[in-house]
Image (cartoon, rainbow, N blue to C red):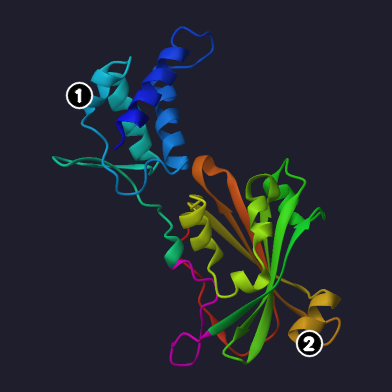
């Protein structure tokens, strides 16, 4: 744990001391610690200093430190181990474990999938992702085809806010082939998916998608949407897949917070 990081927290708290409307000190400390986690300065598994040492370095009381750490632990951002100390928690949703396409055969064996990225582009189109990202107007859209066991293909769209992830536009489709986007976000951009919700609808498949996945125009299939949130419950990504009728069973991912 960096001494410089502690000094930065102490300085920020000292600057806020006495400022009207700054809020309670425990909340200010909470936000300062969370900010270092968001920036990747403090990573999962890092051990925080003992509470007494923490308080000595801060312009706040031991009780304030304890309250801030307790709230961070209650929110799943820290882990407090009796007799061992306080650690930065690993994300409740492990990016390496997120597997959306879990189609299985009659024996329960998971079928292999073969994703191919088609495009990486800036997008200003309106859609359900606009409601999810609220004030965002500009997005990065990644499209791909996912073949399931070479039997049928699904068409997927992955949306990110361009205000935060415009650097994705530097990737070519070939560079993202076979890449788990959730893992890339968590490891390279320190933006783990901490809460994910799923929704499945039965809907008409758009004409442009019908041609890509090999079904007749006007066909209907599953529309499978995923919405992920990161730190502070900020919307992280919106993803959806159009799936054609098929004879395989789909195991829904059940690790949703």
Circle on res. 52: 1
Going from N to C along the chain, the mark reached first, 2 or 1, is 1
Magenta residue span: 97-112
- Quadrant of the snapshot with the N terminus: top left
Residue 83 image point, x, y percent: 13, 40
Label 2 residue SS: loop
Look at the numbered discs 2 and 1 and tell me whether their residues touch, using CB distance below 8 Å: no
Q: Residues within 10 Å of mark 1 (few under 14, many from 20)?
A: few
Report whether residue 223 is seen.
no
Q: Residue at x 56, y 64 (%)?
A: 181
Nearer to us: label 2 or label 1: 1
Q: Is residue 141 left or right of residue 4?
A: right
Residue 97 image point, x, y percent: 43, 67
Residue 106 in magenta stretch: yes
Q: Is residue 179 left or right of residue 155?
A: left
Magenta stretch, main secondary structure class: loop
Name the image quarter holding residue 129: bottom right
Q: Which residue is mark 2?
A: 215
Residue 25 in magenta stretch: no
Q: Residue at x 76, y 57 (%)?
A: 122
Residue 160 image point, x, y percent: 66, 54
> Is 218 rendered above or below residue 21?
below
């Amino acid at each position: 744990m960096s001494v410089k990081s502690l000094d930065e927290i102490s300085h920020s708290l000292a600057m806020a001391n006495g400022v009207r409307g700054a809020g309670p000190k425990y909340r200010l400390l909470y936000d300062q610690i969370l900010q270092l986690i968001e920036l990747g300065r403090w990573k999962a598994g890092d051990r925080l200093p003992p509470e007494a040492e923490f308080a000595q370095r801060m312009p706040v009381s031991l009780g304030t430190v304890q309250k801030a750490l307790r709230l961070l632990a209650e929110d799943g951002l820290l882990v407090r181990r009796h007799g061992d100390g306080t650690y930065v928690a690993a994300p409740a949703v492990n990016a390496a474990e997120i597997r959306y396409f879990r189609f299985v055969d009659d024996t329960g064996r998971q079928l292999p999938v073969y994703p191919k990225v088609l495009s990486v582009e800036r997008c200003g189109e309106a859609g359900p992702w606009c409601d999810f990202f609220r004030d965002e107007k500009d997005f990065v859209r990644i499209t791909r085809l996912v073949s399931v066991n070479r039997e049928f293909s699904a068409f997927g769209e992955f949306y990110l806010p361009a205000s935060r992830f415009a650097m994705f536009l530097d990737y070519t489709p070939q560079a993202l082939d076979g890449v788990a986007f959730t893992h890339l976000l968590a490891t390279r951009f320190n933006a783990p998916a901490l809460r994910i919700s799923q929704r499945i609808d039965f809907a008409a498949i758009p004409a442009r998608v019908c041609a890509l996945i090999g079904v007749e125009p006007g066909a209907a299939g599953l529309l499978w949407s995923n919405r992920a949130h990161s730190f502070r419950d900020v919307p992280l990504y919106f993803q959806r897949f159009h799936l054609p009728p098929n004879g395989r069973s789909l195991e829904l991912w059940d690790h949703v917070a």
